Image (cartoon, helix red, strand yellow):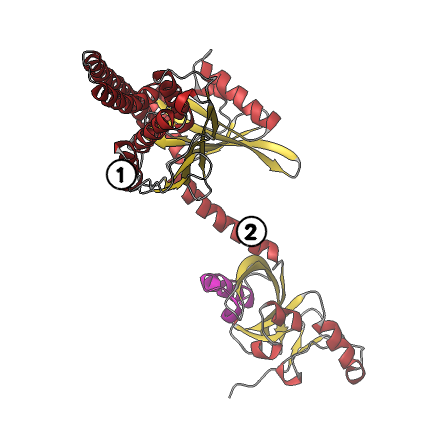
Amino acid sequence: MKKMITQVRHRKNPGQFLQGKEIKNWVSPPAGLHLPANEALFRALNDNALINLYVIQNDRLMYVNQGMARLFGYEAEELIGAAITQIIHPEDHALALENVRRRLAGEVASLRYEVRGRCKNGETIYGEVLGVRACLNGHPVIVGAAIGFSERRRAEAEIAKSQALLNVILNSTADMIWSVDSQSFGLMSWNQTLYRYFQMWDGITLEPGMRPEDLFPSGSSHIQFWRESYQRVLNSGSFTAEYQFSAAHCILQLNFNRLEQGEQVFGISVFGKDITAQKTAEALAEKALAEKETLLRELHHRTKNNMNVILALLQMQADASDDEALRKALQETRNRIYSMSLVHQKLYEARHLSRINLKEYINDLVELLLSGYEISSERIVYLPEMEDVFTLLDTAIPCGLILNDLISNVLEHAFPGGRQGEIRVQLQRTENDEIILCVSDNGVGAPPGFDPRENAGLGLQTVFILAESQLKGRLYFDATQGMSCRLQFKDDLYHSRV
């Protein structure tokens, strides 16, 4: 068995010894100190030293102090006798072993170099080792210290790794990204997308420090745009703008931001997204919508005109007849047709081609009916209590027909003999998206025992069919004071097709 070396005599100080494994891995004090009396003191000084100490013989650790052991996450006893490669990163094994060999062989007396360490938990740490050649019982050893291993070096490595990853991401995106300094507006950095755009469309190779004047022809409006934009972000902070990119004929959405370190602004970053396809699609959609709106307006206009022709024909038929019952039936038919024609008139005039304001529509329809029955506003007062309620064409037409028959019924029966009175129309939309339309009067009311469903004429029959079948609504009649009819329905049966 190979003899264990227990003392290391320093080559230049023969009176000073380094103690080996058999005396519990501590370094002996200089000559002149009495070992037994000062052992505890010297061990305390050595193990609490700020320097991480080690001794290497061949390629193994024969001594480490507590600081050195803690640095790598070990107890000192775990490292005594271990190969130095146990605490060296695998990629630096060759470097460390070669440097140990050179010193032990006497090629160099001392070395200081950077190396990566490997902790017990597998973590990599960064720093430097400094070691000098010494002699132990005629055998060469290395006495040294691990220095500079710190979180800073680890952080630098992490930053470098993050920077490399960031560069991959920035150069993989289809967006243009670059930065300029805050003084001359010269380029500081850019990604490959921006580089390719200038190469492809302008034949310019980007270089650090290039200013807007270096990228665009003299006197170009582009130079003014970029200088004003850079100055704006310095003065006012982040903002977004659109820009026509030089010869590429593409439209960019630009996001400008200040680059700050503490309170100091040192540059400007710009993110440019190519939105040419989006803008082209929007323009085509707007053009198609404009054409569609024109066609729909023409359709509503022609529908209204065709209904007016029908109204005129019915009026001619009524004028040519002496039958009062026929004349009345034709007039009721004309009123119903006009209520539908009025919807198309409102849609033709509206900004939105599928929705009309029921409030405006009802006001016009009631005024028309009062005028058609030749009833003055002094005799029967119209009292609207309505909110702005917008509905689709499919809802507005049955509402108009229902309202037409209810108002006509009031005008014909509620105020006989020239009586005066009031017609009240209420309209609202509830929180659960129901529409409530109520028509009431203070006229003579219904005769005793009158059942609106059983005793309904053609007008009220039409009201029930439209309310319950087409609008899926509910009708409520009240004849306690005059007559009141309330229609309530959910406005979710139809959806906009425009």
Q: Residues within 10 Å of mark 1 (few under 14, many from 20)?
A: some
Q: 200 or 484, which lies in front?
A: 484
Residue, far bottom: 1
Identified at 72% across, 77% down, the residue is 28
Name the secondary structure under disc 2: helix
Q: 8 or 325, which lies in front?
A: 325
Image position, residue 118 (x, y; %):
52, 66
The quadrant the C terminus occupies is top left
Amino acid type, callout 1: Ile
Q: For mark 2, what is the residue?
A: 156
Q: Is residue 496 visible?
A: yes
Image position, residue 252 (x, y; %):
40, 27
Give the label, 1 or 2, closer to the camera: 1
Q: For mark 1, what is the residue?
A: 465
Amino acid type, callout 2: Glu
Residue 115 shown left or right of residue 25 in the figure: left
Image position, residue 301 (x, y; %):
27, 17
Identified at 57% across, 23% down, the residue is 231
Is residue 102 highlighted in magenta?
yes
| First in residue order: circle 1 vs circle 2 | 2
Q: Which residues are magenta?
A: 85-105
Name the secondary structure under disc 1: helix
Q: Quadrant of residue 353?
A: top left
Q: Is residue 350 visible?
A: no
Asked if residue 125 is positioned above or below residue 193 in the image, the reply reads below
